[in-house]
Image: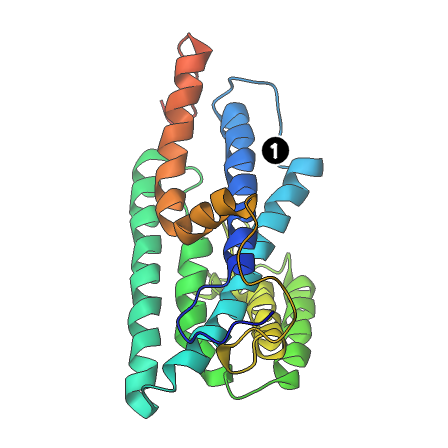
Amino acid sequence: MTSTGTRARYWEIDTARGAAVITMILFHAVFDAGYLRIAPVNASTGFWRMLAYLTASTFIFLVGLSLTISHARAKRKAAGRALYVRYFRRGLTIFGFGLTITLVTRLILPAGWIVFGILHFIGIAILIAPLFFRFRIANLILGVILILAGYAIAGIEGPWALLWLGVHPASFSSLDYVPLLPWFGLVLIGMYCGTLLYPDGVRGFPIRTEAPAFAHPLMFLGRHSLTIYFLHQPVIILLLLLLAHRPVAAPWW
């Protein structure tokens, strides 16, 4: 069955985002346990590293997918400047959240503070996405090109001013780094899939309209992913410290 509601949320998208929230929490729990030296685990390589990439890729792909749906619905009510002001405000808001993360991590994690993490990236992606709404297959092609370009420039050293693009100084280190190359390419691929799977903002493939029972917890997580992103790290760290039952040699203490 297909949905024709113009404001309906699609359970399959919320479910996928909710699954990414779970893998995000799992990865950060393992990473924090190693970073705080509570457990002898290295989340920077192997399976855990791949899980981190999969989680980030899911979130970013869904950003592009969701943008095409929201744009298709919004243009029925607004056009021109009014239509794009909403993306400008939304992008700046999320980028502002990213700056909050920058400030906090600069104070407590000076060795790996987050300069251009996933929230900074999503904010910028939303700001520039309106330039690509009119494209379809071109977004897919350009997305692949940007991903390849990102891998091509990986390891190239450059000034801090190009950090957002994917070029950075040799001394740069950050606990979360999501530059436009290659990651905006994945947004464009998500936008292409959005126009393909949800033409005019309406589900264009057969699937049950009502969410199955197993999906409801994931849907809840997916709908509150931004709030969970802000809250989950302090909660994880507090729980780890309580479970450790001993002073922890945290890098910033």
Q: Is residue 118 visible?
A: yes
- Which is nearer the eye, 251 or 176? 176
User: Can you name the residue that lies furthest to the bottom here?
Assistant: 80
Q: State whether residue 75 is above or below residue 233.
A: below
Q: Amino acid at mark 1?
A: Ala
- Which is nearer the eye, 136 or 78? 78
Q: Residue at x 49, y 29 (%)?
A: 32
Q: Is residue 126 left or right of residue 2?
A: left
Dividing the picture into quadrants, the one containing residue 139 is bottom right
Q: State whether residue 138 is above or below residue 180.
A: below
Q: State whether residue 100 is above or below residue 160.
A: above
Q: Quadrant of the N terminus?
A: bottom right
Q: Is residue 95 left or right of residue 51?
A: left
Q: Is residue 153 left or right of residue 116?
A: right
* Number of residues whose C-alpha sits closer than 10 Å to that of mark 1, classed few (under 14), some (14–19) or many (20 or more): many
- Which is nearer the eye, 201 or 253? 201
Q: Quadrant of the C terminus?
A: top left
Picture coordinates of residue 61, whole percent (x, y)? 57, 63
Q: Residue at x 62, y 49 (%)?
A: 53
Residue at numbered disc 1: 43
Picture coordinates of residue 213, whole percent (x, y)? 54, 45
Q: Residue at x 39, y 10 (%)?
A: 247
